Image (cartoon, rainbow, N blue to C red):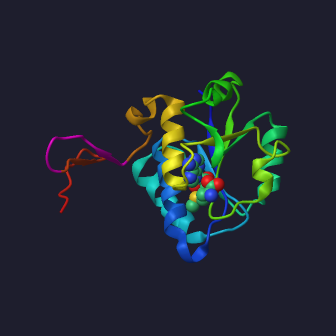
Amino acid sequence: MTKIIVLRWGHRIRDERLTTHVALAARALNATGMILADVKDEKIQKTINSVVKNWGGSFFLEMGTPWKTALSNWRTRGGVVVHLTAYGENIQESDVMQRIKATHRDILLIVGSQKVPSGFFSSEWTDFNVAIGNQPHSECASLAVFLDRFYEGSELSRKFKDAKLVIIPCRNGKNLVSKNLEKLKIT
Ligand SMILES: C[S@@+](CC[C@H](N)C(=O)[O-])C[C@H]1O[C@@H](n2cnc3c(N)ncnc32)[C@H](O)[C@@H]1O
């Protein structure tokens, strides 16, 4: 299966919540890991470590790598770089998703912040610029739609290896089971 690693650019330490949500969405929707470009934030590392420990899987977080280093390493290893931007080729109206899939290569998926480096738009650094509609919205929303379209919904029924906590879907209430199958009381 094609691996997708998210590169988050533009994290602000005083506003760690959004980056945490990008990482949580990436993990839940089948990305392999996330690179937090240019900065390190131990608070995010701690949150992600704890989520992975309890909810399973092997999602990784790499921090502090300069974006140019991350992109050139990725391309040297044969991967493609996809940049999510409102200015890109519309995912619904163009054949961009087909062309990405036709590469059969692992993907580094860039999500930005307010104003991203102009290099992200250029073929010097990026293979595809993809718009989740051509209206500006959010990095979390664009990431979620891209992953869902790429994996065609299969990511939503994925089971996470070595999970200590598992939610059993139910019509009403909350059903959470711990590793030793002891039902937890949630309030
Ligand atoms: C607050 S938005 C900034 C919007 C920015 N003007 C742009 O180029 O998309 C932060 C990030 O969300 C993602 N994003 C926002 N709207 C998007 C859209 N319609 N399609 C794809 N990505 C989008 C981009 O990765 C962007 O860098």
In this view, 157 is above or below 137: above
Name the residue located 51 percent from the left edge and 58 percent from the top edge.
Answer: 48
x and y, in percent, of residue 138 in the image = 52, 56
As for residue 170 lying within the magenta part, the answer is yes
Q: Position of residue 175 (x, y in %)?
A: 20, 47
Residue 153 among those drawn in magenta = no
On-image quarter of the C terminus? bottom left
Q: Residue at x 61, y 29 (%)?
A: 94
Which of the 4 image quarters holds residue 65?
bottom right
> Can residue 61 be seen in this snapshot?
no
Q: Nearer the viewer, residue 145 or 59?
A: 145
| Relative side of 181 to 32, left or right | left
Between 105 and 140, which is closer to the camera in this rendering? 140
- Where ligand 1 lies, by quadrant? bottom right
User: Above or below — where is 41 with respect to 135?
Assistant: below
Identity of the residue drawn at 43% across and 42% down: 162
Question: Can you give x and y, in whole percent of width and height, for residue 46 in the image?
Answer: 52, 66
* Residue 78 on image: x %, y %: 80, 33
Depth check, front residue: 47 or 73? 73
Is residue 174 shown to the viewer in this render? yes
Q: Which residues are magenta?
A: 164-173
